Amino acid sequence: MQTSVTFINLDSSETLKSYACEKLDRFDKYVDNPAKANVVLTVEKFRHIADISISADGFVVNSHEETSDMYSAIDMSLDKLEKQVVKKKDKKKYKRLRATAARTKMLRYEEADGTAPGGLEQEAASRTVRIQNIEYKPMDIDEAVLQMDLIRNSFLVFTNSQTEMVNVLYRLKDGNYGLIQPSS
C-alpha cells in the first residue's frame, strides 16, 4: 500500500510514521489492486487527531478520530476504516453476485424458449417455480387420512391401491379432507 503521512503542529516522528504504515498493512488482505493511503496526524492543544483516507478498488473511505493519545487515535481511526472497507467489499460482492444471477437466469430462459426475453416473456421469466420431488406409495384412502394426521401436512400424494392411480388428499380449512383423483 502506498502511504503518505503528514504531520501538522507536530514534529515528524519516524516511530509514528512506521506505526501508521505497519497498521495500514492489514488492509492489504481486503484490497486486490494497489491502494493509496493518506494519513494526516494533527495536534491541537491537548487533542491528537488522526485523519486517514484510503482509496482502492474503485472506492474511497475516510475516518477522523480525536483522542488524548496519538497512537489510540490511529488505532481507533483504523478500526473505523476496517468496518467501512469490509462493508464496501461485501456490497460490491453482493452486486456482482446479483448481476451474475440475473445474467444466468436470462440465459437459461433464452436457451429454454429460444427467444430473447421482453414484455410478457420477461415477466414470466422472473417467476420462480419451486420443484419438489416426492415419493408416493400405494395405500387406500383411510390409510392416507391417518398418514396425513401423523405428518401434519396440508396435502399428501399417494397411489390409490384400488385404482392404481395417483391421488392427492388435502386438508380443507374446516378440518375435513378433499381428494383429487384423475378421471379415467
Image (cartoon, rainbow, N blue to C red):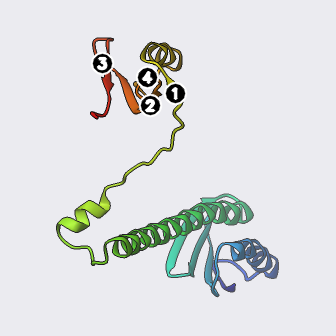
Q: Earlier in the sequence, mark 1 or mark 4?
A: 1
Q: Earlier in the sequence, mark 1 or mark 2?
A: 1
Report how far apart the C-alphas of labels 1 and 2 lie in the structure: 8 Å
Tags 1 and 2 in contact by the CB under 8 Å rule?
A: yes
Q: Position of residue 87 (x, y in %)?
A: 54, 62
Which residue occupies 49% across, 15% down? 143
- Amino acid carrying mark 2 in the image: Glu
Tags 4 and 2 in contact by the CB under 8 Å rule?
A: yes
Q: Which residue is tagged 3?
A: 172
- Amino acid carrying mark 1 in the image: Pro
Report how far apart the C-alphas of labels 3 and 1 lie in the structure: 23 Å
Q: Earlier in the sequence, mark 3 or mark 1?
A: 1
Which residue in the rendered view is the most extreme toward the right?
15
In the rendered image of this protein, does residue 21 appear above or below residue 121? below
Report how far apart the C-alphas of labels 4 and 2 lie in the structure: 6 Å
Q: Which residue is tagged 1?
A: 138
Q: Which residue is tagged 2?
A: 164
Picture quarter with the N terminus: bottom right
Q: Which residue is tagged 4?
A: 162
- Amino acid carrying mark 3 in the image: Leu
Closer to the observer: label 3 or label 4? 4
Question: Tag 1, which secondary structure?
Answer: strand
- Is residue 158 visible in the rendered image? The answer is yes
- Amino acid carrying mark 4 in the image: Gln
Q: Position of residue 58 (x, y in %)?
A: 50, 82
- Is residue 46 visible in the rendered image? The answer is no
Which residue occupies 32% across, 12% down? 176
Residue in front for this viewpoint, 176 or 76 = 176
Q: Position of residue 171 (x, y in %)?
A: 35, 19
